Amino acid sequence: MMDDRVFCIDFGSGFTKVGLRAIPSRDSALLNLPGQQGGGVEFCLPSAVMAEQRDIGQHYEFGYDALGYRTDNRYQLFTNWKGWAFEAGQDQPAGLEAMLQSADFAALAGRYQVSLGQVKSLQYLVEYSRGLVGAGPVSPESLRVRRAKVLADKFFRFLREFTLKAAERLDPPLPNAHDIPVVLAVPAFAPEAELPNHPGVQLLTRALAAAGWPLRQPSAVISEPLANAIGVLTGGCNSLRTTKASKNHPSVTRIDLAKMFGRGPILTAMKDGKFYPLYRALIVDVGAFTTDVAVVELPTHELVDYPAAGIRIRQQSVALGVRNLDEQILAVLPGGQRTYMQTQATARDWEDFRPQVYTDGKPFKTIEVVVGTKAEQPAIKSALGEFGRSVASRVSEFCGDLQPANMQELILTGGGNYIPAVRTAIEAAVALPGSPIVRVSSPTRKTGITDAVARQLDTEAVRGGTALGGASIYFEPKYW
Ligand SMILES: Nc1ncnc2c1ncn2[C@@H]1O[C@H](COP(=O)(O)OP(=O)(O)OP(=O)(O)O)[C@@H](O)[C@H]1O
Ligand SMILES: [Mg+2]
């Protein structure tokens, strides 16, 4: 059956990842996207778009091809524009900005033979000099939302071609890949059932459909924290078991949760069922745009016999991520370095900058400039610490009223959790009720939590958990 297959698009603010379930009982896998490697990872495609105004119209570059650009008077580089989509429905344009965006103004411009490029430039000019022109109660969001619509349309169109090309190279081959329905992972800004109606989600799913992606029915979206939790806990394992037919009961095929979760980090807890009747995982994915938090609780002794009964999941996304850290770091850099990173650095430079400065604590050097010299280190360190603490305090808030559990595990994923200051702050802040944290799974073999076992997650789990999990059989109700 065709609808047993699915693509899961984890449209990340920094990087897009695509998961695939090709057959219900086969494990989900991440698509290795052809081309260069995004930040050194073969399944991470930069969500960057470059727009160039040419005489014949706009010209675009996407993904790896956009990384070498910076915004100047010829090119416009868009990175981390996912957040703009989620400003949809928040504000109405007003005043001067509304006039410049109106059909009336477009008609007027047409009468005077003003080019579209000039109209756009005028809109940008007004947006960026709002303070100067005293534009009053205009909404800075409106133009961003309009841009997000265009960018999503173009990006998902490109992503479709790119994905289908990657699918062509799969072994075994993937027949009729263009018919495979798609599910989109989105921030948990609303309860799961209401997510499809969120204006930001609608903006994105409309763009997907317009780009030719068949949307999965009945729901084409899944929340990021939930998908990430399932992806990390199952490692992408899909398993079904068929019951024996008896006189009164026909044979049925059901999801085999014990097997799916049994391969992942819960293994110990399940084997030790009587000592750890309640297993809890706290999963924190620090992305570029959001921090996605999920708590998964499993009564381990019931998992085999009554899988659906016991699993409890709570989740939330907060709009706080590495793009906010970028801003905090810019604010503490000396003028020259700040201007360089704002106006001269390409998207590729930023991808080098973050691991070097945030994770390794080293300076970032180009021919023109050194950012993060010894003199600047204290300010950078304190900005990193502050960002870590603000992420950690949102996580503690979320954990506020949890009931005690016996076996607890902390799982840290997302590119932001490569940054030591972020991990340290989260580890220091989470005090889960019941028992101490028994195990910490993260991108490193280290942990600051005394007595906890540290387990290193592979890159697929750290960066690809959401795409893997979103493609899981776990989300196919017919197998429950
Ligand atoms: N080793 C590293 N050190 C520091 N930063 C890193 C490292 N690797 C990746 N990053 C940065 O981490 C950020 C988050 O990456 P990730 O792929 O998890 O985000 P995303 O999924 O695109 O964002 P979101 O889920 O919020 O939409 C990116 O800005 C990326 O540049
Ligand atoms: Mg993400």
Image (cartoon, rainbow, N blue to C red):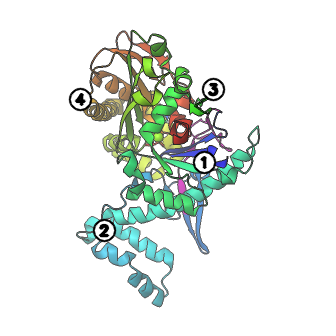
Cβ atoms at labels 1 and 4 below 8 Å apart = no
Q: How far is mark 3 from mark 1, CA to CA?
A: 51 Å
- N-terminal of the pair, mark 2 or mark 1, is 1
The x, y position of residue 98, in whole percent, is 33, 74
Q: Nearer the viewer, residue 415 or 310?
A: 310
Q: Callout 4 environment at 10 Å: few (<14), some (14 to 19), or many (20+)?
A: few
- N-terminal of the pair, mark 2 or mark 3, is 2
Q: Amino acid at mark 2?
A: Gln
- N-terminal of the pair, mark 1 or mark 4, is 1
Query: Residue at image x 49%, y 51%?
Result: 219
Q: Nearer the viewer, residue 404 or 311?
A: 311
Q: How far is mark 3 from mark 4, CA to CA?
A: 43 Å
Q: Amino acid at mark 4?
A: Asp
Q: Which quadrant of the structure image shows residue 295?
A: top left
Task: Kindly identify which residue carries mark 3.
Answer: 244
Task: Kindly identify which residue carries mark 1.
Answer: 64
Task: Kindly identify which residue carries mark 4.
Answer: 401
Task: Kindly identify which residue carries mark 2.
Answer: 92
Residue 388 on the magenta segment: no
Residue 317 falls left or right of residue 74: left
> What main secondary structure does the magenta stretch of the protein show?
loop
State whether label 3 is within 8 Å of ligand 2: no
- N-terminal of the pair, mark 2 or mark 4, is 2
Q: Amino acid at mark 3?
A: Lys
Q: Nearer the viewer, mark 2 or mark 3?
A: 3
Q: How far is mark 2 from mark 4, CA to CA?
A: 37 Å
Tag 2, which secondary structure?
A: loop
